[in-house]
Amino acid sequence: MISSQQLVERALAHAGKQELVVRVTQNSEANLRWASNSMTTNGMITEQQVDIVAFATGSQGRATATTSAVVRDETDIVDLVEAAQLAAGEAIPGDDTEPLLDAGVAADWDEGIPHTDPTVLTQVAEGLGEAFERALVDGVEHFGYAEHSVETVFLGATTGTRLRFVQPTGRLEMTAKSHQRSRSAWVGTAETDMTHISVSALDAELRQALAWQGRTVDVAPGRHPTLLSPSAVADLMVDLYWSADARSAIDGSSVFARPGGTRVGERLGSPSLTLSSDPADPVPGMRCADFEVALSASGSASPADNGLPLSRTDWISAGVLDHLVTTRHTAAEADLPVTPGIDNLTLTYEDGEGGIAELAERMGEGLLVTCLWYNRVVDPQTLLLTGLTRDGVYVVRDGEIAGTCGNFRFNDSPVGILARVRDGGRPERTLAREMGDYFNRAVMPALVVEDFNMSTASQAL
């Protein structure tokens, strides 16, 4: 097999006079799947993919195009490069003419590639076996999966860039059902070290949720004081983050636009709230690539910025919109700092204390939402979302869980929610249920929000 580093060099050697960016991704993954208290599948996946970004400059400007494939030999490399160059020559030029960067050579460029293996899930599998035995006795059914992967990204360019980053990622999701599947609870966790996961503790959390569902309390749809779990907060903040690109704001098509410019510098919410990203985040599992990788042009990324260094960025600082996601081109156009997107997200609530139990006690009366599902943007200019609560919304009375009220469809905006936050807990590593497939690295507090809009009742469990 051609090594990843060799693939980069051989692809660049066929660039000719055209500028070229090459990304080679080497990924290994171990996984477990289970349903109805039985393991269904487990295995290993190893993948290697090559992506070529070609640039073509003509009288009308500069265009880019990207091709991707699994490469087997030298012929495949040549074909892939030529296909990218041909597509770039036929593409419509864009307005981004920033020069391709020379980001230097990483000190670990020539090092070997780490892999995961099935043993990283041994402790999880053993814990599941014990949970299944308990479940069979108690009439509980477990469903879910666990995954652990190690991805190594190699980035090279005709300008001289040679960078790499190793990204471990892990997650586990468990759903428990009981009473002829009339009750359902979910829990998820993100960990790069899967030995830190206690299946027994997760099982206990699920059983507590199923017990809470033993009593039903009628609650009408409408606006309610609501305690959002860290997972639910993560889903809302990821949607906010992915909408916070300068291009959309400049065009007037996002919630972060205002007449003649952007809302940078405007207060959006409580001064206790700060939303940030940091590639060097010291929280275990939160570290991510410290350079930009962009295969195509979008409102939040530019192929010309490949290799651009990334550093801590406060998107919202003490409740004020501090930065939008920019490329070098959109930053110059909007007179904003160059702040590309980063693959992690942290929300903090200043002096936030406690978790869900403590926040429920302080809230007194309201609802508890454990997770969200199927979130979709209804109106980009207000960032109005619609989605579903899942696996139980709980009623808080006198600071304690009094029962469940079923599920709801919600309609609300994460930007509007920021202005209605009344209390927050300590930040913790969490897994967004809806966005966890695409965005694994999040640290969030539970939040108490006034007037969360439960628009209609939902029959979903």
Image: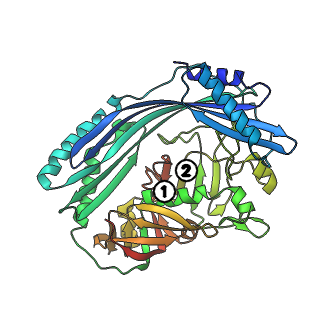
Residue highlighted by disc 1: 234
Give coordinates of residue 185: x percent, y percent: 29, 59
**Can you see residue 399?**
no
Q: Could you tell me the amino acid type at mark 2?
A: Leu
Q: Could you tell me the amino acid type at mark 1?
A: Ala
Give coordinates of residue 89: x percent, y percent: 76, 38
Q: Residue at x 26, y 37 (%)?
A: 125
Dividing the picture into quadrants, the one containing residue 104 is: top right
Q: Secondary structure at mark 2?
A: strand
Locate residue 260 relative to residue 378 in the image: left or right: right
Mark 2 to mark 1 CA distance (whole Å): 8 Å
Above or below, 461 against 59 in this view is below
Q: Residue at x 40, y 79 (%)?
A: 221
Give coordinates of residue 177: x percent, y percent: 24, 58
Above or below, 117 against 96 in this view is above
Q: Residue at x 62, y 63 (%)?
A: 319
**Can you see residue 123?**
yes
Residue closer to the observer: 445 or 253: 253
Locate residue 196 relative to residue 182 in the image: left or right: right
Residues at marks 2 and 1 touching, judged by CB atoms closer than 8 Å = yes
Residue highlighted by disc 2: 345
